[in-house]
Amino acid sequence: MRYSELFGKTSRDFPKEEVAKNAKLLLRAGFIDKLMAGSYTLLPLGFRVKEKIENIIREEMDKTGAEEILMPLMHPKQIWNETKRWEYAKDVMYQFKKDDKEYALSFTHEEVVLDIVRKRLSSYKDLPIKLYHFSTKFRNELRAKSGILRAREFLMKDLYSLHASKEDLDKYYFKVAEVYIKIFERLGLKARMVEAPGGVFTENITHEFQVLAENGEDSIFYCEKCDFGQNKEIAKVKKGDKCPKCGGLIKEGRSIEVGNIFPLGTIYSEKMGIYFADKKGEKKLAWFACYGIGTTRVIGALVEVLSDEKGIVWPKEVSPYEVHLVGLNHKAEGVYEKLKGNKVDVLFDDRDISAGEKFADCDLIGIPIRLIVSDNTQDKIEWKERIGEKTELLTIDEVLTRLH
């Protein structure tokens, strides 16, 4: 991709009301555009990051046996009345009336997925059911001041599973928990699973996936030695205590929530009539759980945790491009064509501006590898990684060998 043709260039300005680092950097680097408080457009660079995040999540969801679907964003009032959440969650939901009928925008999809399932579930042979989708969520966020970390409209991956027994649900629930840790590792984040309250979803203890971050909005207590952790809102431990799991020291830290999982049991199934016939032909309630990852929230978390004083630092797995080619003479055109011809995903800065401006934009955009073609490099290419100061002069064949 030629940078001169890319829609959404870097900028030295950003909305003055933005206070979050993720919003400032993503706006300046040309990844997002702000429509209003809590509502952002993913520009081409941001959309490419989102696609790579979704593809990693999709790969891992498919491995668990889950199947992808896509559910509606506008829901009728009556389906939310079945679980009584039309009233219970009204402060969070966007509700409206049209032609004397009432609707809500998708705050979450438990009711919708259960309506889909009950039309098709009859026997234990139909279970387990594992369905997921990537979708927009709308929530009346009163504190929309953290960029894309806390928006009123955002993207999320939801997984829903139904099971014939609690044992089967628990088995899959903790399997997904392990998969979530793996997903976040692949995305470049070190997430901790911590116990948390269920909010408007359930009274049960649930689990969040939190990434330690200096500017995080949450607070967690966690063990310095093992994987024990609790959200401060429900914590039974405090800073300085001994870990109830291994005896290690309990620490406190600010964090960003990037995912959550909820063991919902049979409460929703009972309210919505999600029954099946077991092996004896007896009528039983299905066991239900839901699992979420905030895809746009992950983008914000990556920027909060991995950026430096120069700009964003993307992990290679989710970077919008594999390499950033800086052209400072006519030979760069040939290098660009050679890279494209060898299936290298490259952003080529072909603009007629100073080298300093190009280098500053490289650092701001944050692609992991910078390649420079200039008079100083002669017939070679300068290789520099986003993190670190070391540079090397390589032939095009050596560059291609490293990239592949």
Image: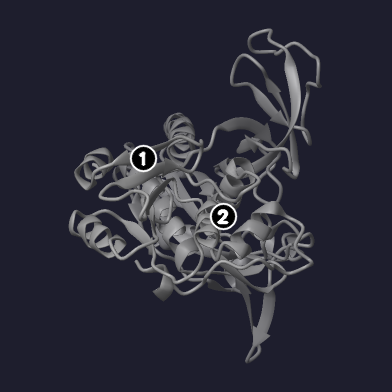
Question: Label 2, label 1: how many angstroms apart (C-alpha)?
Answer: 58 Å
Of callouts 2 and 1, the N-terminal one: 1
Q: Choose between 92 and 99: the one closer to the eye.
A: 92
Q: Quick check: 102 above or below 151?
A: below
Could you tell me which secondary element the residue under label 1 belongs to?
loop
Q: Residues within 10 Å of mark 1 (few under 14, many from 20)?
A: some
Q: Position of residue 236 (x, y in %)?
A: 78, 23
Q: Position of residue 374 (x, y in %)?
A: 37, 55
Residue labelled with disc 2? 364
Farthest-out residue, bottom: 99
Q: Position of residue 53 (x, y in %)?
A: 43, 51
Q: Amino acid at mark 2?
A: Leu
Q: Choose between 110 and 137: the one closer to the eye.
A: 137
Could you tell me which secondary element the residue under label 2 belongs to?
helix
Tell me which corner region of the image, top left, top right, bottom left or bottom right, holds residue 241. top right
Proximity of marks 2 and 1: CB atoms separated by less than 8 Å: no
- Residue drawn at (66%, 25%) of the image: 229
Name the quarter where the C terminus is drawn. top left
Q: Is residue 137 left or right of residue 401?
A: right
Tell me which corner region of the image, top left, top right, bottom left or bottom right, holds residue 222. top right
- Residue drawn at (63%, 57%) of the image: 25
Q: Is residue 256 left or right of residue 292?
A: right
Q: Position of residue 306 (x, y in %)?
A: 58, 41
Farthest-out residue, top: 247
Name the mark on residue 278. 1
Q: Residues within 10 Å of mark 2 (few under 14, many from 20)?
A: many
Name the quarter where the N terminus is drawn. bottom left
Q: Is residue 354 left or right of residue 103?
A: left
Q: Amino acid at mark 1?
A: Asp
Tell me which corner region of the image, top left, top right, bottom left or bottom right, holds residue 108. bottom right
